[in-house]
Image (cartoon, rainbow, N blue to C red):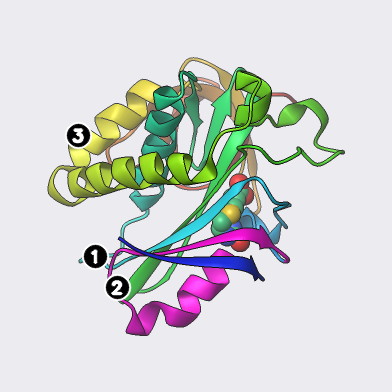
Amino acid sequence: WKIIRLDEVDSTNEYAKRIAPDSPEGTVVVAKHQSAGKGRKGRSWASPEGGLWVSVILKPPRVDPRLVFVGALAVGDTLADFGIDSGIKWPNDVWVNGRKIAGILTEGRGSEYAVLGIGLNVNNPIPEGLGDSAVSMLQLIGRELPLDRVLERLLFHLGGWYRVFLARPDLLMAKVRERTFLIGMTVRVIEDDSVVTGRVIDVLDDGSLLLDVDGQLKRVLYGDVSVRF
Ligand code: BTN
């Protein structure tokens, strides 16, 4: 890894996209604070000091939406290193006991490059307004953690899962299936312009979610899942 450390940036994903064409795979951008952190679907992502706001430039040989799971699995392993049990909330969140601890945002340009952006609540305060829906490692462990140590574990696990993604995406997805706590639950999925409610049956090898909607099987490729509605 080649790590670029910034005090302040608009968004590590934006920064990474700017430098990606001229940067080697494995370039990492990490910032103490983001002034315009981005979430999925154009939402903003509060990024006060104390959190881990990081983007990794990758150059996989093909465009593959399953890259997001490399981030989700690496975050899960990192949390486990600190004694925290977590699960994947398909497709791009990591939750602990019903609360969000990390979000992942992948962006890219065709097969030229991909940026894997990870926001992990470590020592940062949880923004008011999110109330009980989000949680930090500090809240769970009861003491501040050295951010560098968390980053080191995260990059270690990212490297491992990225290799699995490249060589054996089926094994990657088997692990995702194991960690997806939604299986068996009734959820509401908002796709671009439709909403479906159904019971989660499985996560398929192509990364999609398989739902039982009134007895009919339905595959969802991408969407926002709510478990409380
Ligand atoms: C989501 O849950 O909607 C995804 C949140 C992704 C946040 C991370 S923080 C580092 C990187 N830079 C950004 O602007 N966003 C991602």
Residue 168 position, x and y percent, is: 15, 42
Residue 142 position, x and y percent, is: 66, 20
Q: Which residue is labeled 1 in the image? A: 62
Q: Quadrant of ligand 1?
A: bottom right
Q: Range of the magenta residues?
A: 11-35
The quadrant of the rendering that contains the N terminus is bottom left
Question: Circle 1: is it few (<14), some (14-19), or many (20+) Cα within 10 Å?
Answer: few
Q: Is residue 72 magenta?
A: no
What type is the residue that disc 2 sits on? Ser
What type is the residue that disc 3 sits on? Leu
Indicate if the residue with disc 1 has its beta carbon within 8 Å of ligand 1.
no
Whichever of callouts 2 and 1 sits on the residue coming sooner in the sequence is 1
Q: Secondary structure at mark 3?
A: helix
Q: Nearer the viewer, residue 86 or 181?
A: 86
Q: Which residue is labeled 3 in the image? A: 171
The residue under the point 47% across, 72% down is 16
Contact between marks 1 and 3 (CB within 8 A): the answer is no
- Can the viewer see residue 69 in this picture? no
- Can the viewer see residue 57 in this picture? yes
